């Protein structure tokens, strides 16, 4: 036969599991080392082993010796300077979100960046302050160190607050939380638990960050309007705060509102210019640092603080502080916040890292990233830093300005270091309203995520539901409870999807070996007497019962009713058999009575023939045996041909190709299906069973003499050919070659 392009012809035997093991030479060997071998290997010490461990835990040792100055130095220098300039305003602005003084934002833009330079694997992300993490830290610091706990001595309840004591304790809370979050991340990285972030789906993360952006926005309104709302905690605190700010609007400080509006306008216009002309501009205009310098100069020389009572950041100490151990007594009070910060920070970090790695063709180690981020937080916590993660805006600038390696991060930290040592004190007259506007403008990317809603409505409504529930719970329940509710709901959607899969009856497509859903494809026709059933997901304890119910509904085989009908039929057959036996016995009784009458008549005549009596008795016993044999044969014949089938279906093929594992409930369900359907004269076969599932079935004792491996077939087509071959050619003939080799 001449084959045409795009066509193929395969001739082989029908393969069940037994034949498959012979043909493919299935073995029990394994190339994977055993658990004992892996443990032994992990404790083995040698020169190459030590080098491998050092390079895996300290990536700097692997890439820095191969650093190409000719290819990378200029790009990293320009990129590092650009990102360093962005670190200054964002560090100071985001520190306000954490309810800390701006200088701690500068510290946070310095130490963790140096640690990530040594241990990180991503070449393009910019570690440092981030709005979402900052607001999460701020919720903990304000909860444990509210203004009411720090009254000024001798104020007699006038409401004055000891700012130095309050801010000092808030730093302790933030550092303790940061160190604990870092410990969580390091431990998860050591046990190779980087996959935990996979439970945070993209709709969940985007919905959560959008809700967090709303929290950030509301928290900064007080600086824009110059009001002092009350502090609320717990669920609905965002709503209460927003209502309180609206009530305080008549008390708005007009000078601060003017400063905010002017700064906001300038930032928006210049950032739009940067976006429109990003391909023509060699570097984006550093408008944030320009605005900070201009606002500081205008406030200082214009006397805005003394004349109009404009709120400024205050004294920014020069120099670096000595490291301090965190207050471990606070660990129990911030453990929930720390774990939430650890998970969310890592989720944002690894998603950005993998995005850039995919774009530029290198690999990011998810577990090493967890360790690197954990070390950045844990070490930074000793130097008065709060929790960090990567920033999308800074990472985009680092990549777009030519950054090739982590050296760009090192250069940016040098710029921050110079600022902290020599320049930081000059920003003491910087209005807080300016920093708030910088935060507002940088939230633009997060608020753009609202466009996910119409897109998800068109593509996937379950993901849309996850997005909306996450956003709503984050808004109403705050960041910690909102995250917990979001993760729980997201996992529930996965469970519901496996509990409510799509069940299909498959039909044969003429001229092919394909079997498709009859509800979806018109040319897919059912084979008379054979039901081919498929589930879109694996069979396990949560959906095993529904699998059986769906099979009965789709195939029309109501096992319970058919079993009841079989029992009635069997009972009727037994009654008929008893009647036949009773009739045969009645015949038996009538025959001896006739013989007795004949004997009496012969006696009367005086002629008794003993030989005749013997022949008659023998004849009677033979006739009895003949009658019973005919009755039994008639019953057997009736059982075989005279009794109609209970169901028009004689075979069921279960396509289990989508099943990746089976548990004890699934095994029991399958056993019961084989048994119950067998009792109503319906044969059951499995098709497309994966090797791992076959092994699990063997371990569970699924296969027996009455249920051999020959009931398993490589494909649905193999199972159908086997059924048709066993039933004979008169039932149905496929229009593909069904002749086995």
Image (cartoon, grey):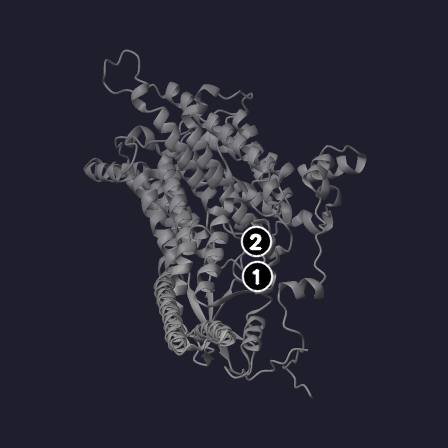
Residue, disc 2: 697
Sequence order check: which comes first, mark 2 or mark 1?
1
Residue 637 coordinates in the image, percent (x, y): 46, 76
Name the image quarter holding residue 734.
bottom right
Using the image, tell me which numbered label, if any, was put on residue 275: none
Residue projecting furthest to the right:
47
Residue 300 appears in the rendering: no
Q: Secondary structure at mark 2?
A: helix
Residue 342 appears in the rendering: yes
The residue mark sitting in front, 2 or 1, is 2
Residue projecting furthest to the front:
606
Vertical placement of residue 670 versus 299, above or below: below
Q: CA distance from mark 2 to mark 1?
A: 10 Å
Q: Could you tell me which quadrant the C terminus lies in?
A: bottom right
Q: Secondary structure at mark 1?
A: loop
Is mark 2 in CB contact (under 8 Å) with mark 1? yes
Q: Dot 2, how many residues are within 10 Å of its Cα: few (below 14), some (14-19), or many (20+)?
A: some
Q: Nearer the viewer, residue 21 or 218?
A: 21
Vertical placement of residue 732 versus 389, above or below: below
Residue, disc 1: 689
- Image check: 123 left or right of 161? right
């Amino acid at each position: 036969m001449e084959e045409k392009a795009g066509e193929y012809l395969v001739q082989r035997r029908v393969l069940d599991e037994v034949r498959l093991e012979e043909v493919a030479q299935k073995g029990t060997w394994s190339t994977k080392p055993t658990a004992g071998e892996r443990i032994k290997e992990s404790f083995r010490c040698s020169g190459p082993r030590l080098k491998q461990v050092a390079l895996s835990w300290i990536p700097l040792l692997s890439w820095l010796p191969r650093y190409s100055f000719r290819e990378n130095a200029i790009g990293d220098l320009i990129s590092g300077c650009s990102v360093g300039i962005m670190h200054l305003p964002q560090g100071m602005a985001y520190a306000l979100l954490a309810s800390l003084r701006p200088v701690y934002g500068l510290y946070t833009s310095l130490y963790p960046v140096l640690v990530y330079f040594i241990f990180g694997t991503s070449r393009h992300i910019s570690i440092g302050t981030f709005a979402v993490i900052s607001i999460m830290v701020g919720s903990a610091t304000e909860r444990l160190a509210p203004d009411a706990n720090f009254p000024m001595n001798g104020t007699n309840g006038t409401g004055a607050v000891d700012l130095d004591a309050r801010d000092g304790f808030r730093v302790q809370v933030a550092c303790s939380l940061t160190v604990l979050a870092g410990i969580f991340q390091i431990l998860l990285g050591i046990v190779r638990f980087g996959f935990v972030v996979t439970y945070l789906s993209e709709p969940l993360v985007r919905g959560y960050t959008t809700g967090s952006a709303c929290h950030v926005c509301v928290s900064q309104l007080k600086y824009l309007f110059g009001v002092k709302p009350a502090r609320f905690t717990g669920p609905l605190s965002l709503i209460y705060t927003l209502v309180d700010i609206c009530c305080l609007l008549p008390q708005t400080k007009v000078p601060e509102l003017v400063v905010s509006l002017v700064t906001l306008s300038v930032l928006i216009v210049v950032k739009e210019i940067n976006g429109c002309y990003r391909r023509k501009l060699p570097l984006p205009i550093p408008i944030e640092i320009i605005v900070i310098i201009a606002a500081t100069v205008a406030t200082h020389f214009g006397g805005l603080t003394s004349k109009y009572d404009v709120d400024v950041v205050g004294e920014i100490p020069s120099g670096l502080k000595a490291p301090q151990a965190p207050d471990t007594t606070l660990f129990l009070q911030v453990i929930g916040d720390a774990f939430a910060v650890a998970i969310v920070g890592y989720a944002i970090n690894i998603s950005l890292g993998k995005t850039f790695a995919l774009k530029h063709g290198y690999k990011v180690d998810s577990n090493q990233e967890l360790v690197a981020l954990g070390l950045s937080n844990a070490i930074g916590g000793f130097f008065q830093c709060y929790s960090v993660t990567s920033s999308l805006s800074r990472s985009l600038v680092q990549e777009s300005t030519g950054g090739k390696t982590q050296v760009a991060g090192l250069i940016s930290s040098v710029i921050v270091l110079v600022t902290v040592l020599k320049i930081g004190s000059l920003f003491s007259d910087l209005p807080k309203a300016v920093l708030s506007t910088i935060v507002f403008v940088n939230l633009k990317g997060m608020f753009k995520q609202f466009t996910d809603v119409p897109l998800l409505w068109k593509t996937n409504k379950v993901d849309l539901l996850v997005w909306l529930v996450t956003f709503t719970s984050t808004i109403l329940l705050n960041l910690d409870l909102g995250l917990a509710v979001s993760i729980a709901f997201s996992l529930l959607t996965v469970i519901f999807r496996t509990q409510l899969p799509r069940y299909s009856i498959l039909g044969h497509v003429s001229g092919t070996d394909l079997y498709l859903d009859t509800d979806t494809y018109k040319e897919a026709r059912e084979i008379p007497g054979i039901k081919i059933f498929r589930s879109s997901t694996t069979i396990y304890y949560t959906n095993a019962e529904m699998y059986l119910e769906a099979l009965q509904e789709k195939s029309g085989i109501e096992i319970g009713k058919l079993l009841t009908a079989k029992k009635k039929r069997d009972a009727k057959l037994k009654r008929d058999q008893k009647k036949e036996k009773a009739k045969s016995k009645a015949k038996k009784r009538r025959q001896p009575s006739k013989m007795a009458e004949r004997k009496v008549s012969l006696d009367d005549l005086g002629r008794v023939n003993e030989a005749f009596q013997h022949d008659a008795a023998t004849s009677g016993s033979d006739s009895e045996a003949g009658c019973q044999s005919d009755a039994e044969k008639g019953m057997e014949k009736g059982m075989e041909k005279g009794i109609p089938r209970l169901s028009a279906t004689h075979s069921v093929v279960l396509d289990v190709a989508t099943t990746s594992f089976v548990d004890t409930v699934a095994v029991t369900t399958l056993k019961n299906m084989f048994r119950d359907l067998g009792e109503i004269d319906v044969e059951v076969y499995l098709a497309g069973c994966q090797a791992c599932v076959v092994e699990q079935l063997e371990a569970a004792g699924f296969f027996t003499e009455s249920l051999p491996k020959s009931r398993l077939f490589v494909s649905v087509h193999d199972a159908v050919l086997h059924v048709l071959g066993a039933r004979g050619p008169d039932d149905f003939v496929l229009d593909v070659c069904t002749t086995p080799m």
